[in-house]
Image (cartoon, helix red, strand yellow):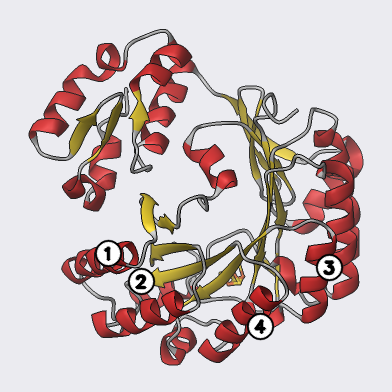
């Protein structure tokens, strides 16, 4: 069955029991929210999408999925497994935060077939964790990962951040060393982006946020690539590093521009050539699902030109790059017929390379990804 199954399912749990200072995800403070009503609606929306066909990956993200209590958590996993579980499922990931990943929740995930954990660590420096408003400390994070490993979860990815306020290269080095000592086969690491409607945005506007400059940020990124690669975690995407055989399968769907169901408040999906966004506010989401069985608030049929652009933006994030033969097969045109000028210019500037069938970022291009991506906008 899996050869024909190409889609994934992203399921969003928008609840958090505290709000981090940098966060612009679709999330809501959990207290007084209609969590059980939300889980009812989620099950109904899962039924709607499951009827369109099976998936090869499931990714439960948030918000904070592990903020649910054990009863709610079990109910959610049982519904997901009922609608999307099957023996040939390739990957079933749940995002977990150190402060609320209990032994009971680890057991439940084992029981319902979760085979990959994504742990939101961000840093192993307690001062930095306080600065960015996280609810856990470094000891909680280490302990959580070790408990998950002892419970039989081998495929664990850590989320880390860099270019944080007050962070030095030495502090980053210490966090990387601690992360590596835990021996997880995958690490994702993102630089802090200051987004509107966040506490950090307001502090920045008030001149109260001290961030490392662009040069230090680039040095940090270089340090990350060097350190992780030296320890056998190969960079396979701009922000992702893994041991052989542990690349994230669900996220690879996005980078390969494949389709996925987006289920839950504020989730985005891509189904039958259409990208859609679900209603974000929890009560609106519940009401829409009650009426229609799904919660689409906006949708857009992706044009061929947009698909071509996305193929480049998303594919070039991968270190392997964009396959010329796959491009031809998908769009019936050679990549150089569409992008010959851009490819030649970026190659001459040392930002792109051609490697067999693939067009890929050069080492210099990896540091200047956004400049490269924007060259592939066709209008
Ligand atoms: S970063 Fe995660 S835990 Fe923090 S507020 Fe955002 S969604 Fe919640």
The answer to whether the residue bearing label 2 lies less than 8 angstroms from the nearest atom of ligand 1 is no
Left or right of 112? Residue 298 is left
Counting residues from the start of the chain, the first of labels 1 and 3 encountered is 3
Counting residues from the start of the chain, the first of labels 3 and 2 encountered is 3
Mark 1 secondary-structure assignment: helix
Residue receiving disc 1: 221
Residue drawn where x is 14% and y is 24% of the image: 344
Instruction: Quadrant for residue 188, please give it.
Output: bottom left
Q: Quadrant of the C terminus?
A: top left
Q: Which mark is residue 99?
A: 4
Percent across and percent down for residue 311 are 42, 28
- Comparing labels 4 and 3, the label whose residue is closer to the camera: 3
Left or right of 325? Residue 58 is right
- Comparing labels 3 and 2, the label whose residue is closer to the camera: 3
What's the distance in space between the residues labelled 1 and 3, CA to CA?
A: 37 Å
- From the viewer's side, name the closer residue of 252 and 151: 151
Counting residues from the start of the chain, the first of labels 2 and 1 encountered is 2
Instruction: Quadrant for residue 88, please give it.
Output: top right
Mark 3 secondary-structure assignment: helix
Query: Crowdedness of circle 3 by 10 Å Cα count: few (<14), some, many (20+)?
Result: some
Q: Can see residue 308?
A: yes
Residue receiving disc 2: 162
Looking at the image, the residue that sits furthest to the top is: 332
Residue drawn where x is 73% and y is 71% of the image: 66
Percent across and percent down for residue 325 are 38, 17
């Amino acid at each position: 069955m899996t050869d024909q199954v190409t889609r994934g399912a992203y399921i969003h749990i928008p609840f958090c029991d505290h709000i981090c200072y940098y966060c612009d995800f679709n999330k809501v403070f959990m207290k007084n929210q209609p969590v059980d009503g939300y889980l009812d609606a989620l099950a109904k929306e899962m039924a709607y999408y499951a009827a369109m066909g099976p998936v090869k990956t499931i990714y439960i993200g948030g918000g904070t999925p592990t903020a649910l209590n054990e009863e709610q958590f079990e109910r959610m996993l049982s519904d997901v497994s009922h609608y999307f579980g099957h023996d040939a499922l390739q990957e079933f990931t749940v995002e977990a935060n150190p402060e609320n990943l209990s032994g009971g929740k680890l057991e439940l995930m084992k029981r319902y077939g979760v085979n990959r954990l994504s742990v939101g660590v961000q840093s192993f420096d307690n001062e930095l964790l306080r600065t960015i408003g996280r609810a856990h400390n470094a000891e909680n994070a280490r302990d959580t990962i070790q408990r998950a490993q002892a419970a039989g979860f081998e495929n664990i990815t850590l989320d880390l951040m860099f270019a944080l306020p007050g962070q030095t290269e030495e502090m980053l080095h210490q966090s990387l060393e601690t992360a590596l000592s835990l021996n997880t086969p995958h690490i994702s690491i993102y630089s802090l982006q200051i987004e509107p409607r966040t506490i950090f945005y307001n502090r920045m506007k008030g001149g109260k946020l001290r961030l490392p400059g662009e040069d230090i940020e680039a040095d940090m990124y270089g340090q990350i690539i060097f350190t992780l690669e030296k320890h056998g975690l190969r960079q396979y995407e701009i922000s992702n590093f893994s041991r052989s055989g542990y690349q994230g399968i669900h996220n690879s769907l996005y980078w390969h521009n494949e389709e996925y169901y987006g289920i839950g408040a504020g989730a985005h999906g891509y189904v039958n050539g259409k990208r859609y966004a679900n209603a974000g506010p929890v009560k609106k989401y519940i009401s829409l699902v009650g009426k229609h069985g799904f919660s689409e608030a906006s949708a857009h049929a992706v044009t061929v030109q947009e698909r071509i652009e996305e193929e480049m933006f998303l594919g070039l994030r991968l270190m392997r790059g964009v396959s010329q033969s796959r491009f031809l097969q998908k769009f019936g045109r050679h990549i150089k017929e569409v992008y010959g000028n851009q490819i030649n210019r970026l190659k001459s500037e040392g930002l792109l390379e051609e490697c067999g069938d693939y067009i890929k970022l050069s080492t210099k291009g990896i540091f200047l990804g956004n400049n490269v991506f924007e060259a592939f906008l066709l209008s």
